[in-house]
Amino acid sequence: MRIYQQGSALVKIFLCLLPGMPAVLKAQQTDTTRTRELREVAVSAPRGNKEVAPGQQLKGKELQRLGTQSVADALRYFSGIQVKDYGGIGGLKTVDVRSMGTNHTGVFFDGIELGNAQNGQVDLGKFSLENMEEISLYNGQKSSIFQPAKDYGSAGSIYLTSVKPRFEGGEQRHIKGTFKTGSFGLVNPSILWQEKISQRVSASFNAEWINANGRYKFRYQKEKGYDTTAIRKNSDINALRVEGGLHGILNGGEWNSRIYFYNSERGLPGFVVNNVFGHVDRQWDRNFFVQSSWRKDLSKRYSLMLNGKYAYDYTHYLAPDTVRYIENRYRQQEVYVSVANQYLLTSWWNLGLSGDFQWNKLDADLTNFSYPQRFTTLVALATSVNFNRFSAQASLLNTIMNEEVKKNAASPSHQELTPAVFVSWQPFAKPNITWRSFYKRIFRMPTFNDLYYTDIGNSNLKPEFATQYNTGLTWSHTFSGKILQELGLETDAYYNEVTNKIVAVPAASQFRWTMMNLGFVKIKGIDVKAKAVWQILKDCQLSTRVNYTFQDARDFTSQAESFYGHQIPYIPWHSGSLVLGGSYRDWDLNYSFLYTGERYDSKENIRDNYMQPWYTSDVTFTRSWKLNRTGFRCTAQVNNLFNQYYDVVLNYPMPGRNFKFILSVNI
């Protein structure tokens, strides 16, 4: 009888995923018992903090259903974003929002930016989803004026929000243990411990270890087709992540502190070309930071927020098989403090003033290294108005940067004023249609590598500017007593320009390159997002999420170049994703599809540089149950179901079909 009941559950979940079912089944009421299991509670939020242009979000159960390994994997399901993946579990993973480049994207962890002054890139493959409550993506900036000045300083922003301890009546402690295993020799245990210290203070501890050999099959392609199948080597990883946090509630506010440590050794498998299938490069990373945030409404009109952070990053890179033996060590330090103020002039008009200071220092054992230090001061003045169906926000960011170096370079300074304007208007009470638009001009300073890397850096580089224009419509509707319960549609059209783009060009020798301001890129695009929730049977629900992106990103640097007006490298004209999630009682089934269209791997859009489209399908099946007061969750996952062989970055082959099994225990 038990086997029959489980088989029946499987059949009903598959029926939920059939597109034709809603037309022939009757609507039923939502299962309230299942809803209570989510244990959603109200959270204190800053007053007057209405967002003019809400971002894309993945959170809660929807994020859990994807079954992805890292933050970078989850971000692939947002529109307008490209994830550069250099292969394997330990491979570098960076993001590019609307073709403006990785360095124009700010990444914030619990409200404070993750920095990398050395190369400006944050490896999102390092950040696990085990302790993540929500991931959000904002184009332009997060449209709230009560935020640090840093939040105004990027062309696009990714916000990572960790899980906050929440306890129901009588609960004192939560413990969650998870064990993942699967292809590539994966062994990945983790533990999350949450403790209620008092009615207003709680603590959390999260630790995760990941070990994998990273060995997977791939096909090596020559001009006339696939030639051979080989094994990806030197893609192993051994990493430990430990986090601890304290969270407190104030009258009209909250505070939190977090300490983070990550230590890893991994192989860098390198590119596959000329029958070279493996490399022996190694990299060791140690990342540490401690940060705190405090926010309180000091009066009915005035609110104050304080943030602080110290970070230390160590990287050891070894390349023993190059023409010249390379072994380098880099050490970065960062100190960051911020004060943000908000004053409510009236019930509909707010003012914000934020001031940040950041110090960065880079040490390296390179010959004739400059040992740079950077002092950055940011001041942001913002105002917003919020009416019933109209909202607007304007901000002006003043950035002052000074540097000190010890060798071979001048000490540059730079100051820039950059504005932004966001508008949102709902013309009618019904239907729920909202028009939103924004304009923003922002810049990014050259990184320490751009300026000072030995034999490559150029201390005379100018900042790289991005100008953004965006307009779009959103529509949503909730249906009562229908099979189709929720339906939402968003579409945005945008135009961006990137000027003084920093590029590497060869100098007198192919072994010596230099950085120069050469680039000018025009970007036109359309993002479309649709979401729906269907109540098929009493206990059976289906959710659908579809994203589509069109991007025309062309290089207009110089008419003398053969690639003038060509699509820039690795940007597809068409890309998208589809997520189908079905649930029946304690069973969940999730199907996700990713598509990246044709693109080119170099500046010239010619046949030799053409890259074919690729797509992947992932399937996740989950069963949850309780034994006494202990909850269990068992997941089986198949990634790249149809065993597609593809490269996200040329000559860095991605895994074919692979499997993962996850067991979680909640006490």
Image (cartoon, rainbow, N blue to C red):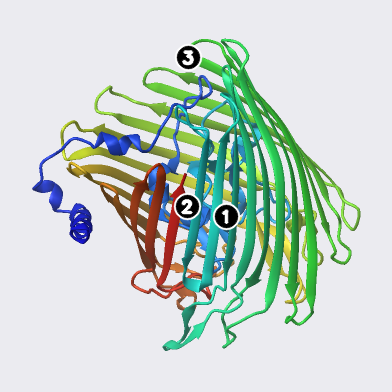
Local SS, label 1: helix
Labels 1 and 2 touching (C-beta < 8 A): yes
Q: CA distance from mark 1 to mark 2?
A: 9 Å
Q: CA distance from mark 2 to mark 3?
A: 34 Å
Q: For residue 345, say whether it is visible.
A: yes
Residue placed most toward the observer, 412 or 222 = 222
Q: Earlier in the sequence, mark 1 or mark 2?
A: 2
Report the label total: 3
List the residue tagged with mark 2.
75
Q: Position of residue 633 (x, y in %)?
A: 39, 52
* Residue type pointed to by label 2: Leu
List the residue tagged with mark 3.
348
Q: Position of residue 487 (x, y in %)?
A: 26, 39
Mark toward the viewer: 3 or 1: 1
Local SS, label 3: loop
* Residue type pointed to by label 1: Leu
Q: Earlier in the sequence, mark 3 or mark 1?
A: 1
Residue at 42 percent across and 45 percent down: it is 630
Local SS, label 2: helix
